Amino acid sequence: MAENLSFLAPMRILRGTDPGRVAAILAAIAVIGALYGLPLLRLAANRLVVGDPVFAGESFGAEIHAAAGLTVAATLIFGGSRSEIGGAGAVTLLLSAFALLTLGLGSTAADLLSGEPPAARASLASGAWLAFACLAVALAIAVGRASRPWLGALAAGGAVLILVVAGRSGALDGLSLAVELRARREAVLTAILQHGLLSGGALLLGALGAGLLAAWRRAQGLVEILVGGIQVVPAVALLGVLVTLASGALHAWPQLRGLGLSALGPVPALIGIAAYLLLPLWRGVTLALRAPDAATLDAATALGLRPRQILAQVRLPLGAPVLIGALRVAAVQSIGLATLGALVGAGGLGQIVFEGMAQFAPDLILLGAIPVIALSLAVESGLARAEAAARRWSA
Amino acid sequence: MSRLRPVLGPALAGIFLVIVSHPRVARTIVGWLGEAPRRALDPAYLSALALNHLLLAGSGLILVASAGVGLGVVATRERGARLRGGIDTVAAAAQAVPPVVVVALALPILGFGGPPTLLALACYGIMPVLRGTVGALEGVPREAREAATAMGMTRPQILSRVELPLAAPAIIETLRTALVLAVATAAVGALAGAATLGTPIVAGLQNQNLVPMLQGAAATAALAFLCDAAMLGLAALTRR
């Protein structure tokens, strides 16, 4: 009898007023729907054609059903207990579901490919991507419920660890994405490094420029117009203009070539990206300088603090959250814009993306796109955490 | 007339850039820079590209505005209050996927041309508009709403006659940013084969032909500034 009534549990949860629960249940339903309703893999004759869909019911092992079961169990635990332990338990179950799904997809891909010619590819299909995305959403909700700030980083680290261990052991070798990665391992690692240098360098250059602009007190009105105007110019257009100007500069001063400069390459990309970061960074610096109110500054002066001491001991601590917030916005923008840098020959992950577009090879595009998205999500969440910490510290 | 002063800057910048994109001017500039000026694009082709660019960006804006403002209205109703917590999280996550990457990922699924660009516009534009609309509607003074209730207005009447008119300038401000973003994304769409003003830039970068590249870049920037000016003008006219 108890078994027959268990299906009522989700309905009881739905009546609750907690939007997190509703979202968790919706995410779990979406995971199940994606696993059983959509193709999980596509088997193709080579890497460029769209393959035939393979569904969960056809040739998958027990891992997929186990992953689905764990997702349902996680949702029930999550809905059943409001406690933080419920959240932590759900996180564990969802991570296990993620591991099982990954391994299941890997082993089925290997099974499908055995007996096929070497050019055949088994690539992840819509159902697998949707299931991964919904699992990530469910994980985020469960992490939020557990209200332990380190759990999010731990869960993300766990997911990465699962992927690395599975990849190293060869369990994912059948998947087209892994084949593509094996062929271009060095290129991808170089591109990630270049991307980091490009976006980090532009961030540094932008911060320098923003600091100088904010220090130019008399012309703040003009600075606002200029910095705002740059935002209106589309990035592709700005890069084009910069390349034109750079080649003009090289004609006027050929000795610049001796310094290793060229019209195409990282220099125009760095300048272009930094130009877009000026607005958030400059705004952040001016707001941060205005963060302490007049009374606080008067008190500091009355205490006998010198201007430099006021800057270091009053203005900076009070302005830190605003400053880190600006840095966060700028850093995410920088990583995104660095993708376009490949257009002017600056390298980075954009180069892999564009190569994939030119060859019309979806897995190659993914190989460039996934690190970009992962980098920006990591930077975004890391700096968001730093911003919250600074807010607590200065309050 | 003084209301229209903010329009002046972007409008002048736009007109200046239109002049730069003219074949003769662009060739002269490239000549000054010391490069051999090669064949330029004729104005008819450039304006055809501009029209296509504007159509793509405009339909993107309509998509983003209807979804963003609509969801913003829902999120600010009493029943939608629960959604608001999630909006900021989703908005932050959506910003992590740059438009180029969306265009690239959509390419194998949606094929060449406009559709991947429209998808990128929707992915990148809806959340900022939604956020801006929520902010604008929340900025409507409570007294105004209470007065309308006291006058016996129904909820839809309050929305259409009090809240939306009062929030209009702030919503238009958000849509201005969205339109500028749409123009920029349509330029990126050239990478996926959409015929926009980004096309001569991408082609010019590939075969080192500076004249069409400068023309395309100036024309794209001009379009962005003119759209910006138009939205600023609209905002100035609604702000009474």
Image (cartoon, coloured by chain):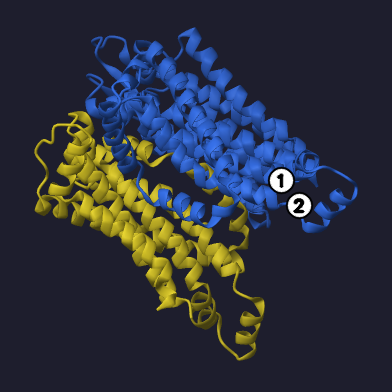
For marks 1 and 2 on the same chain, the one whose residue lies earlier in the sequence: 2
Relative side of A273 to A47, left or right: right
Kindly give the residue lying farthest to the bottom in the view shown: B151
The residue tagged 1 is A319
Say which chain tag 2 marks.
Answer: A
Vertical arrangement, residue A131 with respect to residue A260, above or below: below
The quarter of the picture where the N terminus of chain A appears is: top right
Residue B51, can we see it? Answer: yes
Query: CB of mark 1 within 8 Å of CB of mark 2?
Result: yes
Q: Residue at x 49, y 19 (%)?
A: A103
Which residue occupies the foreground of this view, B68 or A175? B68
Cα distance, mark 1 to mark 2? Answer: 7 Å
Disc 1 crowd rating (10 Å Cα; few below 14, some 14-19, many 20+) is many
Vertical arrangement, residue B199 with respect to residue A266, above or below: below
Instruction: Specify the quadrant of the image occupied by residue A52.
Output: top left
Give the numbered dot on residue A105.
Answer: none
Q: Amino acid at mark 1?
A: Gly
Residue B151 placed where, x, y %?
Answer: 61, 91
Give the numbered dot on residue A292.
Answer: 2
Display colour for chain A: blue
Residue B160 placed where, x, y %?
Answer: 48, 79
Residue A177 placed where, x, y %?
Answer: 37, 20
Display colour for chain B: yellow
Vertical arrangement, residue A323 with respect to residue A115, above or below: below
